């Protein structure tokens, strides 16, 4: 274990790098517009400033810096090992518009480093709020109050109550069963997982009752040790009610705009008819969100707040949404026209959405153009539905600079990221390909990053056996054959989409 400087937070093992599209300013702005809250889409060449609190290894901040060379990007984290690695990757990629700062968010507001931070147009706190102490949360609010610009947008993710109530005992059991200060976090995780599994097998009702807690108990053996350590071993781990988070954010003059998990903004998809009737009858938005949280099994909320919220007239909102350009991220043959939502299974019409998917497979399209493709009998005059389905289901992402070619800063970063992440344990991790056209990241796995890098280097499918040998030298023949098939699928299905989105 680390020394006492860690303040009860896991610091002896690094967090896992990853890309979460909800953190993208393009996605945050799209969320606001979807909910009728005024927010300009990030200007392609404006000198915006993006701030990430609790940036971990900095992957998300690096992707945004690489995809937006005119922006200033700052990532802040408590763990010096995270910051050192992020700075190293930025140097290797030649990124001069990103700064990484090691700081304690409980006190940063009153320190010189906090005073020197520029005003932020977009801020993200992913995997931070419900994992830190009340003192740190208070420091975060003070920093946001001082540094979020008027009209600025803030994304906050957190473990939500009441869904997490079934997992509170499990987390406490894991942490208390492995408090040996001499043990590494990996060893503590092993002990905690073993005890949780043994007690669940012994019939402990609170580890076996249906809900999120039971789902997590069943998944524990599959999850990486680094993730489990950072998720469950922190002393201050504390799931939150939305109303309490919203009240805290109000201390920084931030108003709740909507959910960055876009489908959650559509009560018809999330709630049964009876639940929706009760939800819609409430005037207090806190009550509506609590009713939603009482009905949804998901444990992580992605909330978007705005400093100086202004309501758009319906006609203005409709026009702004129609002008959003979307790029396809899922191979057309893999698009499911039925998918699970909280209220059951949602169906979308192939006759309505099929032409849209086909058009985006060729090139990114504006929402207005996509709506015009609907055949007779499938007309739709609500762009909210198109965005909510296509982007909410993960089939599409917004495009900042339609038609822009790959930018050298993004190309360099993608090459460095492929070298950094291409190891057997990381191959299926959620990552991203930085894209100047998207103004952010194209959702990808590390395999996608690796293949794109090899193709950019002039290699072809003929080198696939060499790629397998490089990525999984100790794998058995069956695993190598499976990996080779995955590499070929990536070349045939994923790379064309990346290139159409300007990420190739």
Image (cartoon, grey):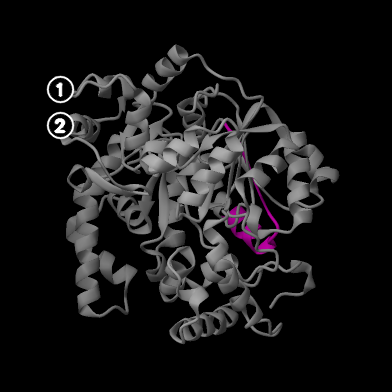
Image coordinates for residue 482, horizontal then vertical, percent: 21, 68
Report the disc number at residue 351: 2
Instruction: Determine whether 79 is above or below 114 in the image.
Output: below
Quarter of the rendering containing residue 247: top right
User: Could you classify mark 2 by the number of other residues whose Cα lies within 10 Å: few (under 14), some (14-19), or many (20 or more)?
Assistant: few
Q: Residues within 10 Å of mark 1 (few under 14, many from 20)?
A: few
Q: Quadrant of residue 400?
A: top left
Going 19% across and 35% down the picture, which residue do you hit? 349
Q: Which mark is residue 375?
A: 1
Q: Position of residue 250 (x, y in %)?
A: 71, 36
Above or below residue 86? Residue 312 is above
Judged from the image, the secondary structure of the residue bearing numbered disc 2 is helix
Give yes or no for residue 72 being in the magenta stretch. yes
Circle 1/circle 2 CB separation < 8 Å: yes
Residue at the image point whose x is 60% and y is 41% from the top: 96
Q: How many marks are shown on the rendered structure? A: 2
Q: Is residue 119 left or right of residue 209?
A: right
Start-end of magenta stretch: 71-88
Say which quadrant the C terminus sits in.
top left
């Amino acid at each position: 274990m680390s020394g006492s400087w860690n303040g009860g937070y896991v610091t002896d093992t690094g967090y896992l790098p990853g890309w979460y599209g909800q953190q993208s300013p393009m996605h945050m702005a799209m969320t606001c517009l979807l909910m009728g809250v005024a927010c300009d889409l990030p200007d392609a060449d404006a000198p915006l400033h993006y701030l990430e609190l609790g940036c971990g290894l900095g992957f998300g901040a690096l992707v945004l810096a690489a995809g937006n060379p005119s922006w200033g990007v700052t990532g802040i984290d408590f763990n010096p090992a995270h910051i050192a690695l992020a700075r190293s990757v930025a140097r290797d990629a030649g990124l001069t518009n990103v700064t990484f700062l090691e700081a304690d968010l409980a006190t940063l507001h009153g320190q010189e480093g906090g005073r020197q931070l520029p005003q932020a147009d977009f801020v993200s706190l992913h995997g931070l709020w419900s994992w830190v102490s009340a003192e740190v949360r208070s420091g975060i609010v003070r920093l946001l109050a001082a540094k979020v610009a008027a009209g600025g947008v803030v994304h906050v993710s957190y473990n939500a109550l009441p869904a997490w109530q079934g997992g509170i005992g499990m987390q406490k059991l894991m942490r208390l069963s492995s408090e040996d200060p001499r043990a590494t976090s990996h060893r503590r995780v092993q002990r905690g997982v073993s005890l949780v599994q043994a007690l669940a097998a012994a019939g402990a009702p609170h580890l076996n009752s249906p809900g999120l807690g039971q789902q997590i108990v069943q998944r524990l053996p599959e999850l990486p040790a680094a993730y489990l350590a950072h998720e469950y071993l922190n002393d201050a781990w504390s799931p939150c009610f939305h109303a309490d988070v919203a009240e805290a954010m109000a201390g920084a003059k931030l108003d709740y705009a909507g959910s960055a998990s876009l489908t959650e903004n559509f009560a018809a998809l999330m709630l049964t008819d009876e639940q929706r009737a009760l939800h819609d009858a409430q005037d207090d938005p806190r009550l509506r969100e609590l009713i939603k949280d009482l009905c949804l099994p998901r444990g992580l909320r992605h909330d978007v707040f705005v400093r100086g919220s202004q309501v758009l007239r319906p006609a203005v909102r409709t026009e702004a949404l129609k002008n959003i350009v979307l790029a396809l991220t899922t191979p057309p043959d893999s698009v499911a026209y039925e998918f699970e939502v909280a209220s059951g299974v949602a169906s979308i019409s192939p006759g309505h959405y099929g032409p849209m998917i086909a058009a985006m497979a060729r090139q990114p399209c504006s929402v207005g153009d996509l709506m015009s493709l609907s055949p007779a009998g499938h007309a739709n005059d609500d762009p909210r539905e198109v965005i909510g389905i296509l982007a909410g289901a993960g089939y599409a992402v917004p495009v900042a600079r339609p038609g822009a070619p790959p930018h050298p800063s993004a190309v360099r970063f993608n090459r460095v990221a492929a070298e950094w992440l291409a190891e057997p344990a990381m191959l299926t991790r959620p990552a991203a390909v930085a894209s100047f056209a998207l103004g952010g990241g194209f959702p990808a796995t590390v395999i996608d990053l690796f293949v794109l890098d090899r193709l950019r280097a002039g290699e072809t499918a003929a080198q696939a056996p060499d790629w397998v040998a490089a990525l999984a030298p100790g794998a058995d023949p069956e695993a190598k054959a499976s990996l080779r098939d995955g590499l070929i699928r990536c070349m045939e299905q994923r790379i064309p989409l990346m290139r159409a989105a300007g990420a190739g």
